Amino acid sequence: MNHKYKLSKYLLVLVLFSQSLFAFKKLPEDFYIDYELFQFIKLRNIEVEKTQISSGEIKLQYKQKNKRYDLNVLLKTKKFLTFFGDKDIQSKGFVGNKGLLFNSFLVNDLKKPKKNISETYDRKNDKLKVDYKKKLTEKKYVGNLLDIPTLLLQFHFEKTKPTYSFDFLEGKKVRNIEYKKIKDEAIRINGRNFQTELYEGEITSVKNSKHFIWLSKSAYRIPIKIRLKMKGGLMIDQNLKNTDLKIKEIDE
C-alpha cells in the first residue's frame, strides 16, 4: 500500500481553543460527534467544490464514568474512499488534567479482520505492547502518548498556542505530528457558521502528510473541519455534521 495513503486513513479519523485552559468546560460524560466525508478536485489552486462527492462518515461516541473513559470512532467509506476501508476504533483509559490518557487502543478492520491491531500502554512502567497479525511486540515509551481518537480531542485540553507537537500511535509505529496556527477564520459548514482557528499539520519526517484543521473557538474546542491533500489534486474534507455538544454559532 502506498505509504502516504496508509497515513492518510488514520488522519481521517483524525477526523485533530481561547486564551486559557480554564476557559473551557469539562467534557460531558456522554456525547457524540458525527462527521461527513467529501472528496473533490483542486487543480491550479482552483477548488471545484461544486463537484464534491459524499464519500463516507465518521461517528464518534464518548462515555465517561469515575474518570474512566470509553471512546469509539466508527469510519464508513464509499466511492474513492473505500480504499481506506471501514474501521471500528476503540480507545479506553482515564481522564487526566492535560488530556485523555489511553490504556488500550483497538482497530477493528470491518472488511479485513486479519489487519486488526490491538495495543496496550502501561504508563506506570512505560511499556507499549502491540498485537498485530498474531505477533506480539513490546517497546519502551516515556512521555504523553496519544492514539488516534484521543488525538482528535486533545486540542480541547490545550491552551491556544501558535504551535503544537504530539506523539501518537500510527499502526505499530509511534509518530510525531506538528501543528502551526495559520489564522482565525469564520467558516460555514452545513448551513451553520462557526468561528474557528485554522492550523496546518504535518507528520514529522513523513512526506505528503500535510493537512489542515479548523478548531472551534467555543467552550468545546473540537475540529469543525479537517482537510487532507492527496495525490493528483484530490482533496478530502471531514466536515462536522451533528453533535450534542453545545458549539457556539455566529451570525452570517
Image: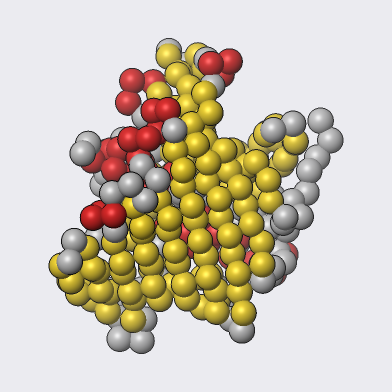
Q: Position of residue 47 (x, y in %)?
A: 52, 17
Residue at 44%, 63% in the rendered image: 90
Q: How many marks?
A: 0
Residue drawn at point x = 24 percent, y = 60 percent: 172
Q: Is residue 230 visible?
A: yes
Q: Residue furthest right?
A: 251
In-front residue for pair 86/30: 86
The answer to whether 128 is drawn above or below residue 106 in the figure is: below
Look at 53% across and 16% down and name the residue there: 51
- Residue 200 visible (yes or no): no
Is residue 76 shown above or below 132? Answer: above
In screen coordinates, is 52 left or right of 241? left
From what the image shows, is residue 191 above or below residue 41? below
**Residue 22, image x and y in percent?**
69, 69
Quadrant of the image containing the N terminus: top left
Image spot of residue 243 (x, y percent): 69, 51
Apparent side of residue 178 relative to residue 155 in the rendered image (left or right): left
Figure check: 16 above or below 22: above
Residue 160 placement (x, y as % from top left): 60, 56
Question: In the picture, residue 104 is in which quadrant?
Answer: bottom left
The quadrant of the image that shows the C terminus is: top right
Query: What is the quadrant of residue 156 in the picture?
Result: bottom right
Residue drawn at (34%, 76%), measured in percent from left and top?
Answer: 121
Snapshot colouring: secondary structure
